[in-house]
Each structure stands twice: as structure tokens, then as C-alpha cells.
Image (tube, rainbow, N blue to C red):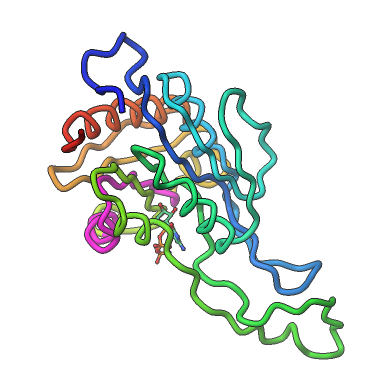
Amino acid sequence: MAKTTSKAPGRALEGVRVLITAGPTHEAIDPVRYIANASSGKMGYAIARACRDAGARVVLVSGPVAIPAPEGVELVRVVSAADMLEACEEAFPAVDAAILAAAVADFTPAHPKDRKIKKDEGGLAFVELKETADILETLSLEKGARVVVGFAAETNDLIPHAEEKLREKGCDLIVANDVSRADSTFGSDTDKVTFVAPDGVVALPLLGKDEVAERLVARLARLLAESPRE
Ligand code: CTP
């Protein structure tokens, strides 16, 4: 990998390969119904564009969103949490860093049906769920010298919850997002985030998602420069 120090201004990730996840996942109940969440994918796509503009080679693994594919980025479209894990496992060995901004479903139907459930069959009154694999935790366990960044979407106790995620998932940085604020929630164009890392906590002001992405690129470049690489 190219060294991450002494890059031209604005090209802080020249030669760096980055995996990014974005958007929600859809978990099938039957062929026409699914469990999802309100993630728009805007943050992950903004990060993908910012990494590309900083010179990185980007693989963007995206759940179902209504955002055009960014130019100059390898886009892998997935639907479910299981698909997202598979695509990430495939891309991860060849990257230097991963930024997991997707709002992955925590639960998925245990027994999805291959034909539409009729309401008089009663099968929709109780849908048995099982936990999905945690992609951030899985990749962090395999990370070696790679830098892995996760997100924490919280409505309360933002910093303690983010610190717990940093510790439990074993990543290098958590971008903690206060989604109780209307200007920092799923679908908004701004975010109020705090970088939570083992060496401390940095609260950013309310910024546009593109500006949050630029700050994250700068932070990632520093983390890569500090990480023990060949
Ligand atoms: N994440 C993941 N795989 C999952 C669930 C979450 O990779 N199955 C990642 C997200 O992409 C994000 C981070 O974990 O980077 C935290 O996601 P969040 O939804 O805030 O936390 P959870 O671990 O799901 O915990 P909880 O919902 O209890 O807050």
C-alpha cells in the first residue's frame, strides 16, 4: 500500500483501498414482505464520495437505497444482512480500511416463507426472529493492521453507548450519531456526530453529511498513518 503520510493536500487517501457499507438491509418475511429500517444511505454514500475524492479505491456495499451510484466507486448491491456480510467478507482481505455506516438489521425472520403468507393463515401475527451476524464485530476480529470504523446510532446516553460498542466490537473508531435530534437522524442532510476512540472523544458541530464525511476521511488518514503497516 502507498504510504499515507506526505500526500498532496486533499488527496489524503491516495492509494488506499476502503470498504464502505451503507443503507438499510431488508429481511424477507415472505416474497412480498420484509423488515427494514429508516436508513437512507446518505451518510455511507457521502463517505464513499469523500474517500474517492481523497484518492481512495472504494468498494461500496449498499443495501436498498434511492441514491444514484457514485461514479468511480465499485458498487456492490445487496439486500439482506446475510448478503451484506458475504459481500464484506469477500472485499475485506483486499482493503486497508473499512467504514461500516450501514444500519444493518439486528434481527431477521428465522423461517422466511417462499410463498406469500395469507392473512387468514395467521402466520403474520407472530414472526419468529433470529439475530443477524454482526458484520462490524466479525471484520474487527479479522482486521490485522486494517483500520475499522463503526457507527453508533443512539437516542440516549450517546457517549457511554458508543464507548461500549468500541470496546465490545473491537474497532478503531466509532462515529456516534445522536439520532434523537431531527437534524441528525435517518434521512436528514446534516449530522451531529462525535468521534469516539480509545484515545479520546471529539464532538463535531452540526455539519452537512458531506462535511462529516470529509472530517472522517481526515481522521481515517491519521489512523492509517499511525497503524503498523508494511
Ligand atoms: N452493525 C453490523 N452488523 C450488524 C449490526 C450492526 O455491522 N448486524 C454495525 C453497524 O454498521 C454500525 C455498528 O454496528 O457500524 C453499530 O450499529 P448500531 O445499530 O448502532 O448498534 P447495534 O450493534 O445494532 O446495537 P443496538 O441496536 O443494540 O444499539
Camera-side residue of 112 and 159? 112
Q: Quadrant of residue 224?
A: top left
Camera-side residue of 195 and 178? 195
Location of the N terminus (image quadrant): top left
Location of the C terminus (image quadrant): top left
Camera-side residue of 201 and 57? 57
Residue at 35% in and 60% down: 137
Residue at 53% in and 45% down: 22
In the image, is residue 159 above or below residue 119?
Answer: above
Q: Position of residue 60 (x, y in %)?
A: 53, 39
Q: Where is residue 78 in the image (x, y as percent from the top left)?
A: 63, 52
In the image, is residue 205 above or below residue 66?
Answer: above
Camera-side residue of 143 and 103? 143
In the image, is residue 199 above or below residue 205?
Answer: below
Q: Where is residue 8 in the image (x, y as percent from the top left)?
A: 31, 9
Where ligand 1 lies, by quadrant? bottom left
Q: Position of residue 91 (x, y in %)?
A: 47, 46
Furthest residue toward top: 8
Residue at 28% in and 27% down: 221
Q: Give the range drawn in magenta.
A: 161-180
